[in-house]
Image (cartoon, helix red, strand yellow):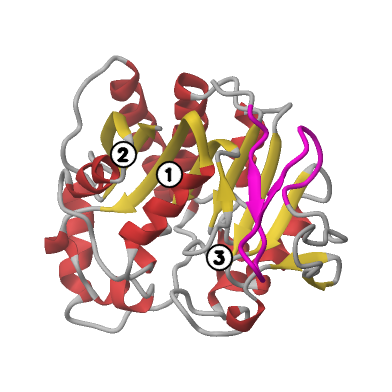
C-alpha cells in the first residue's frame, strides 16, 4: 500500500496541497497556499458544500432524527455493521486513513472504528442535520465534514472508502465512483452497499429518494469501468428475500409509514436469520440474490 499522504484540492481554485501524515484532511483553519482562500465553517465543522447543506437533495432532511431513534438494536443496522466490520478486517485491515461518505447519523462509523481502532477516520455527509447526530455518537476520534460526494476533492489520499447505502441516492453514481477512485491511494479499497433487484422497487424506494435499485453485476461493472478491481461481491438480506418481496408488493398497494423498530421477538428472530446468513458467507457460500448487494473493490 502506498505511503503517499495524498493531496487535497482547493474548493476555490482547484490547486493541490499536500496532506500531512497525521491530522485532519481539512483543518478548520486551512488556507490554500495558492489563492489564500479559507474554508466555510459552522460550529467548528468544515463545510465544503455549504450551498447544499439545507437542500432536500437525495435524502429527506427530517429523516435523520427518525433513523437515529431506531438504529440502535435494529436487526438491519446492527447486522449490516457486523458485515462491514468483517469485510474491513478481511480486505483492508491495515488502513491508516478511512473515509465514510454519506455517514448519516454516524451509526455505521461504529463498524469502522471497531475494525480500525488506530486509523484516522473521517466521516462526511451532505447534510449537517445528520452530522449533528453523528457527532453526538462520536465525541472524539472522528473528523466530520459537510461534503458533496460528487466533489470529494482528494487525490491518492485514502486507504479505505465506505459508501453504505449512498450511491443509490445520487443520479450520477458513475461520477461519484470516479471521485472515489481518485481519492483512493494505489492499493486502496472501496466497500459499498446498495439496494438490489429493480423488480423490488416500491413506494419505500420513492420515500427514501432512491434513484435506482441495482441489477446483479451492475455496480461491479461500473467500478471496473472506473479502473477499480472487484475483489468480492455478495448479497445481503438473502435468506429474507421472500419476506422482503411480499413487503414490497404490499408497499405498492398502500402508503408506507416511517421505518420503525420491529417488536422484540421479530427483531431477535431476524437478527438470528441474518446471523446464519453471515455464517454462510464466512464459509464461502455464494449468495447471488438478496435485498442488498455488497461489493469490495481495490484501486
Expressed as whole percent of the image width and height from the top left, the position of residue 238 reads: 23, 40
**Crowding near pointer 3: few (<14 within 10 Å), some, many (20+)?**
some
* Image position of 158 (left or right of 284): right
Residue 146's place in the image compared with 227, above or below, is: below
Q: Secondary structure at mark 3?
A: helix
The secondary structure type at the circle numbered 1 is helix
For residue 298, the mark is none
**First of labels 3, 2 by sequence position:** 3
User: To which residue does mark 1 refer?
Assistant: 181
Q: Is residue 203 above or below residue 163?
A: below
Mark 1 nearby-residue class (10 Å; few <14, some 14–19, many ≥20): many
Nearer-the-camera pick, 214 or 18: 18
Q: Which mark is residue 227?
A: 2
Q: Marks 2/1: CA distance?
A: 7 Å
Q: Which residues are magenta?
A: 4-25
Foreground mark, 3 or 2, reads 2
Q: Quadrant of residue 38?
A: bottom right
Q: Quadrant of the N terminus?
A: top right
Q: CA distance from mark 3 to mark 2?
A: 34 Å
From mark 3 to mark 1, how far is it between C-alphas? 29 Å
Q: Is residue 56 above or below residue 182?
A: below
First of labels 3, 1 by sequence position: 3
Left or right of 249 in this view: 255: right
- Residue occupied by mark 3: 67
Which one is in front in this view, the residue at disc 3 or the one at disc 1? 1
Image position, residue 172 (x, y; %):
33, 67
Q: Which secondary structure is most common in the magenta stretch?
A: loop
Residue found at the very far front of the displayed protein: 34
Residue 186 appears at what percent x and percent y?
Answer: 48, 29
Amino acid at each position: 500500500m502506498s505511503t503517499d499522504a495524498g493531496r487535497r484540492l482547493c474548493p476555490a481554485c482547484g490547486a493541490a496541497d499536500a496532506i500531512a501524515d497525521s491530522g485532519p484532511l481539512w483543518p478548520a483553519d486551512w488556507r490554500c497556499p495558492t489563492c489564500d482562500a479559507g474554508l466555510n465553517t459552522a460550529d467548528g465543522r468544515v463545510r465544503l458544500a455549504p450551498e447544499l447543506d439545507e437542500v432536500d437533495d437525495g435524502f429527506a432532511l427530517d429523516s435523520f432524527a427518525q433513523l437515529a431513534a431506531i438504529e440502535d438494536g435494529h436487526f438491519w443496522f446492527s447486522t449490516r455493521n457486523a458485515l462491514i466490520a468483517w469485510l474491513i478486517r478481511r480486505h483492508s485491515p491495515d488502513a491508516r486513513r478511512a473515509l465514510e461518505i454519506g455517514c448519516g447519523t454516524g451509526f455505521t462509523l461504529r463498524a469502522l472504528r471497531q475494525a480500525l481502532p488506530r486509523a484516522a477516520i473521517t466521516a462526511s455527509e451532505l447534510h449537517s442535520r445528520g452530522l449533528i447526530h453523528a457527532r453526538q455518537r462520536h465525541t472524539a476520534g472522528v473528523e466530520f465534514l459537510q461534503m458533496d460526494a460528487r466533489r470529494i476533492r482528494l487525490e491518492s489520499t485514502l486507504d479505505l472508502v465506505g459508501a453504505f447505502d449512498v450511491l443509490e441516492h445520487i443520479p450520477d453514481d458513475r461520477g461519484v465512483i470516479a471521485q472515489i477512485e481518485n481519492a483512493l491511494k494505489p492499493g486502496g479499497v472501496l466497500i459499498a452497499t446498495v439496494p438490489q433487484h429493480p423488480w423490488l422497487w416500491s413506494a419505500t424506494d420513492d420515500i427514501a429518494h432512491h434513484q435506482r435499485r441495482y441489477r446483479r453485476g451492475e455496480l461491479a461493472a461500473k467500478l471496473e469501468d472506473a479502473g477499480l478491481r472487484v475483489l468480492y461481491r455478495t448479497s445481503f438480506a438473502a435468506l429474507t428475500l421472500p419476506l422482503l418481496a411480499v413487503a414490497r408488493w404490499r408497499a405498492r398497494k398502500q402508503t408506507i409509514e416511517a421505518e420503525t423498530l420491529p417488536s422484540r421477538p421479530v427483531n431477535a428472530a431476524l437478527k438470528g436469520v441474518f446471523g446464519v446468513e453471515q455464517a454462510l458467507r464466512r464459509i464461502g457460500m455464494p449468495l447471488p440474490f438478496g435485498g442488498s448487494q455488497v461489493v469490495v473493490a481495490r484501486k
